[in-house]
Image (cartoon, rainbow, N blue to C red):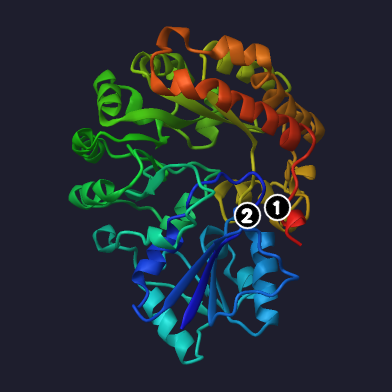
Amino acid sequence: MKIELIVPAVEENASIPNLALPILAALSPPDVEISFTDDLLTPIRLEKELKKVDLVGITVLSKTALRAYDIADAYRKKGIPVVLGGIHATALPDEARGHSDSVVLGEAEEVWPLLIEDARKGNLQPFYHQEGYTELSTIPIPRRDILPKRGYLPLDVVQVTRGCPFRCEFCSVQNFFGETYRFRPISAVVEEVRQLRHRWMMFNDDNIIGNPSYSKELLKALIPLKKKWFGQVSLSGLKKVEHVELLAKSGCNSLFIGFESLSKKNLVASQKFQNDPAEYREIIDTLHRYGIAICGSFVFGFDEDDASVFEETVSFSIQTKLFSAVFMILTPYPKTDFYHRVKNEGRLVQDQWWLLEKPEEWAPYFIPKKMSGETLREGWKRAWREFYSFPSIWKRFQWNYSPTLINRFVYFPFQWMHHRFTKKKILQGRRRYRTRSL
């Protein structure tokens, strides 16, 4: 039996491996031949001859839904059964079912072997949904051998936890993982990390330090391995200097942090209670003292945001010398609390924005309270342009911490790359990746 696993793409995807499908490959029977395609690295030409396989599995995010459906439809026209899974398919299983033979809701580890046996018999069920959540001690080491040898950044990706202890209104994590926050055994993590071939690695967890006692044990176990890593964290785990010191000792050299807003009212309304803007600068300064670079994430369009939010946020990001920043327009992801709220308030103007050919041209998909949609969209563009302008790049260079590896060798090439990305993809309008692969 031959199974093709696919990660659909949009242009702004990062060249980083997806772990979900290599984990499923590791759970497949030995007699199953697995092939893998990352649509970002090897665009699937739908008008060309597709791979001759017995089953296709596609993981779906909301931003890749349209592309995923196009790929699925093309394979099904050839008579090849398709299974869809992932966060978007879990949120909207009936929609996904319209483009597939079967849909996996939620985590797939416990139903994947059964699904393969049903596919062998030509008896795929419309939906698969395992009872309860996967015990992370049972997860095998991903089959990284199925991943392309070239095209990805030179790093390895590792998953340690699933879920998040927080319940932010706009986040889709809870819908997929439920109200759980689970951990892998430290010994299993250490054994996997020992086998990795790159010195650099990324933890793709939603919050690598969400549980203080577990994260402390994990960080101590990483120290002897002498790896360099980055990951996504919550501000709640960065308030103690000793924890930041431990992060640095473990090999952490950069963190992605969701600041989201400089307004406490916005954060409280969004149920992001773990953030306090009054603490931002002190936490940033502490991380910088320990040589940890910061990618800050900010969201525009909260109910308290008016036209002044863009300049205020960019000014803060430059003054605090953030290594990088990501600016986003608040998005009503399906089945999130924010989606339901703006829909109930009559402010949702694009109910199925993920199926639009050029979704960014329609953003925001809801009516903001204190500015027009056009003001929000143009202010978002201006934030990207100003933060990655040459004067900003020069001001943000960490002269005091230039001996750190990431600042000395990576800073200016990284900034130049993002300057070009901003100019071509943000200011000139991003395109669906699908326009290059049809």
Name which residue type carries label 2. Ala
Q: Identify the residue shown where x is 60% and y is 75%.
A: 51
Give the labeled residue for mark 1. 433
Q: Give the answer, above or below, for where 359 lies relative to 294.
A: below
Give the labeled residue for mark 2. 9
Q: Give the answer, above or below, for where 95 lies relative to 248.
A: below
Q: Residues within 10 Å of mark 2 (few under 14, many from 20)?
A: many
Q: CA distance from mark 1 to mark 2?
A: 6 Å
Quarter of the picture containing the C terminus is bottom right
Secondary structure type for disc 1: helix
CB within 8 Å, label 1 to label 2: yes
Residue 365 placement: quadrant: top right
Of all residues, the one furthest to the top in this rendering is: 400
Of all residues, the one furthest to the front in this rendering is: 150
Residue 1 seen in this snapshot: yes
Looking at the picture, tell me which residue is in the foreground, 306 or 64.
64
Looking at the picture, tell me which residue is in the foreground, 71 or 353.
71
Residue 205 seen in this snapshot: no
